[in-house]
Amino acid sequence: MSDKLNTQEAAMLREELEILMNERTGLLKVVGAAAVLVANTDGRNLPPEAAEAAAMLSKCVNDLSEETLKDALETVHAEVGPGDL
């Protein structure tokens, strides 16, 4: 009985881990696209409301760890220069 329960628990954990990894991949795509958008946007050319949202997005992207940002940019196949991170 205990082995069967452990097998079921392991299967449930594997399924949950797979769900989380798929969600991480999706979130990395969003973050990567957001980082590219921020890098290519001049806030001075935006309406004030959009500039405020862009500034908030920029802060969120800049607060990420370097490793996470690299993963995100790789996910969207973005080119990054040596001093860009």
Image (cartoon, grey):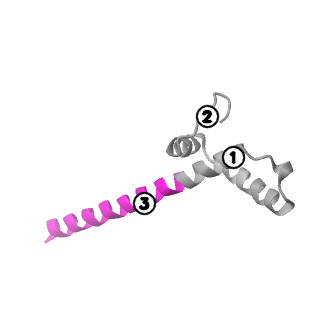
**Tag 3 residue:** 20
Say what secondary structure mark 3 lies in. helix
Residue at 15%, 68% (x, y): give it. Answer: 4
Residue 70 visible in the displayed image: yes
Q: Amino acid at mark 1?
A: Asn
Tell me the residue that label 1 is attached to: 62
Alpha carbon of mark 1 to alpha carbon of mark 3: how far? 23 Å
Q: Badge 3: few (under 14), some or many (20 or more) residues near its Cα, within 10 Å?
A: few
Q: Nearer the viewer, mark 1 or mark 2?
A: 2
Residue receiving disc 2: 80
Determine whether label 2 and label 3 are within 8 Å by CB: no
Q: Is residue 72 above or below residue 18?
A: above
Residue 12: x, y in percent? Answer: 29, 66
Pinpoint residue 74: horizontal percent, then vertical percent. Answer: 52, 41
Inspect the image, locate mark 3, and give the three-letter code of the amino acid beneath it: Leu
Q: State the image quarter where residue 56 is shown.
A: bottom right
In the rendered image, the vertical position of residue 3 relative to residue 42, given as above or below: below
Instruction: Name the residue at 65% across, 36% down.
Output: 85
Pointer 1 and pointer 2: residues touching (CB < 8 Å)?
A: no
Q: Cα distance, mark 2 to mark 3?
A: 27 Å
Q: Earlier in the sequence, mark 1 or mark 2?
A: 1
Which segment is the magenta one? 1-28
Nearer the observer, 77 or 57: 77
**The residue under label 2 is which amino acid type?**
Val
Would you say residue 10 sits in the magenta stretch? yes
Name the secondary structure under disc 1: helix
Q: CA distance from mark 1 to mark 2?
A: 15 Å
Is residue 14 found left or right of 79 in the rendered image? left
Residue at position x 42%, y 58% from top? 22
